[in-house]
Image (cartoon, grey):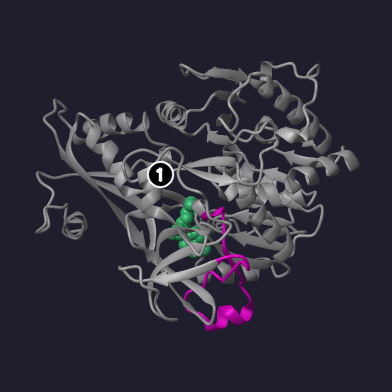
Amino acid sequence: MKLLTHIAQHAARNPEQTAFRTEDQVLNYGLLWDRSSRLASFIHATQLGRQTPVVVYGHMGIDMPVSFLACVQAGHPYIPVDTSIPLERVRLIIEKSGAGLVINTTDSILDVDNVTVLHIPALQLEQEELIGDEYWVKPDEVFYIIYTSGSTGNPKGVQITAANLESFTDWMTRDFPLDQGKVFLNQAPFSFDLSVMDFYPALQSGGSIHALEKEVSNKPKLLFDNLSRSALQIWTSTPSFVQMCFPNPDFNQKMLPELELFLFCGEVLPLAVARELKERFPRARIFNTYGPTEATVAVTSIEVTDELLAHEKVLPVGYPKSDMRILVVDELDNPLPEGEKGELILVGPSVSKGYLCEPLLTESAFGIINGMNAYRTGDAGYIQDGLVYCQGRLDYQIKLHGYRMELEEIEFHLNQSEYIKSAIIIPHTRNEEIEYLIAAVVPADHDFDKEYKLTAAIRKDLALRLPAYMIPRKFTYYTAIPMTMNGKADRKKMKEEVFA
Ligand code: AMP
C-alpha cells in the first residue's frame, strides 16, 4: 500500500523527524515505524482471522498512531475508540464489531469481557521479529472502522477500505497546497473521521502532527499557551472549534506566524467565521470541505477567497474531487436538473462498502451506481455551475459543536430510563446554529420531591450509555407529548410548547 510505503520510506530517511506530538510526548518517524512494525508481528502471532477488527482504545497518546499502523500492517482494520466514550458503549462496540483484540493504550485497566486486551504501556516489543509487507491490508480490505451515532439507538461502524483512504489522501496531497514536511493541527479525537483529515495526509507528506488533547483544548489558558509554541502551518478543525478561539483577541497571525492554511470540514462554515479568520490571519488560505464519514472524510472542496465572500450569502461546500460524482435526487430517486434542491448522493471510490455487520442499514443507505459505490447522504442540497451547496438535513441527524449525532439515538436511550415514560429532543438554535439540546420528558412515576433530583438521576443513567456531548443540557417536564395525525411525536408542536 502506497501510504504505508511512504511512511516506511520517510522513517528510513528521516528517523529523527517528529511524526506525532502531544503536550508532553513526542514520537519520531523512526520509532513510529519500528514500534508499529514490531507490534504488527505481535498481533500477527495471536493468529486472529484475516481482517478481524481490533479496537484501539485511548485518547491522543503516542501509542494510538503506533497501534493504528500496527493493525493495518498485520492485515486488520482498527476501530479507534476514544476515552470519552462510556464503558457500556465501548463494550457494545467490541461485541457488535466482533473485535478479536483490544489494544488499550491508556494507563488504566479496561474492564471488558470475552476479548483479549493488550495493555500497550506494559508490553515489551524490542525482541519481536518483523513480518513482511505481504500481510498489509490490501486495497479492497478494510483499513479502519469508525463508529458514528445511529438512529436505532446503537452506534454503527463505517468501514473504510485502504482504497477509500488512499483516494482521499491522494486528493489531499495533490489538490491542496500541502507541501512536504508541514506541521498539522490534530484537534479531533481519533474516533471522529475529522482526525483522518490531518493524520494520513500529514504522514503521507512527511509532516508532523501536533495533537491537542482534550485536557489542553478545554482550558483556554493551556490551549493558547500550547498554540503559541506550536509553529502550526496547517490548521484542521471543525468551524465550531475555531470559533471557540475567537473570544481571545490574541488568536491571530502573531500567535501563529507560520499558519498558512485552514481546512474545515464536518459542519457549516459560517460566512462570518471565514471573514473573521481572513482579518486575523491575513497570510492564511481557507478551504471549506464537505463529506460524511461514509465517504472518507471529505469529497468536495473550495477555497474561500475574498471574491467568494463578497458574492455568496451562504458558502458553498465546493467542487467534487475529480474521481467522485455527486447527484441530486428527488424523493423517488429521480435525478434533478442543475439548481434544483434534493438529496445529495455521493458516487465513487471514496464511498465505503457499508456498515459493519449491519446489512439492513447498509442496504438502506448504500447502493451501486454505474459500478461504483454510492451513498445516500440525507443532506439536502443543490448544484449550481458545478458547485455543491448544502442546505441542512432531511432527517434527525444533527451537528452540535461539531459532533455528529442522531436525535433518535438520544431519544432511544432516554426512553430506556426507568424514570421516563416518553421523551423527545428539541434542539435550541441561535443564528441558525444549534446551541444546545433540550429533552422534553414525560416522567414515569417516581419518588423525587424536586425536579432537579429527577434530572440528575436521568443524567446519571444517560452518562452510562452516551458520550457527554450527546447528553441534553436542559430537561423540561410535561404530562404528555403531542402527537401528529399519524401517531408520531409532533416535534413542531412540542417545540412551540418548549419555547412558549
Ligand atoms: P461526519 O460523518 O461527522 O463527518 O458528518 C457528516 C455530515 O456533516 C454531513 O452529512 C453533513 O450533514 C455535515 N457536513 C459536513 N461537512 C459540512 C460542510 N462543510 N457544510 C455543511 N455541512 C457539513
Relative to 463, residue 410 above or below: below
Question: Which quadrant is the N terminus positioned in?
Answer: top right
The reply to whether residue 452 is in sight is no
Relative to 25, residue 320 above or below: below
Extreme-front residue of the structure:
371
Q: Quadrant of the rendered structure where residue 60 is?
A: top right
Viewer-proximal residue among 477 and 196: 196
Specify few, some or many for label 1: CA neighbours under 10 Å numbering under 14, 14-19, or 20 or more: many
Residue at (63%, 20%) from the top-left corner? 47
Residue at (51%, 19%) from the top-left corner? 115
Whether residue 147 sits left or right of residue 453 in the image: it is right
Viewer-proximal residue among 80 and 420: 80
- Label 1 is placed on what type of residue? Ser
Viewer-proximal residue among 458 and 165: 165
The reply to whether residue 281 is in sight is yes
Name the residue beneath numbered marker 1: 149
Magenta span of residues: 295-324
Whether residue 263 sits left or right of residue 290 in the image: it is right
> Where residue 181 sits in the image (x, y, percent)?
81, 52
Residue at (46%, 70%) from the top-left corner? 327
- 309 magenta-colored: yes
Relative to 349, residue 132 above or below: above
> Where residue 288 sits in the image (x, y, percent)?
58, 66
Q: Secondary structure at mark 1?
A: loop
Q: Quadrant of the rendered structure where residue 465 is?
A: top left
Residue at (70%, 52%) from the top-left corner? 201
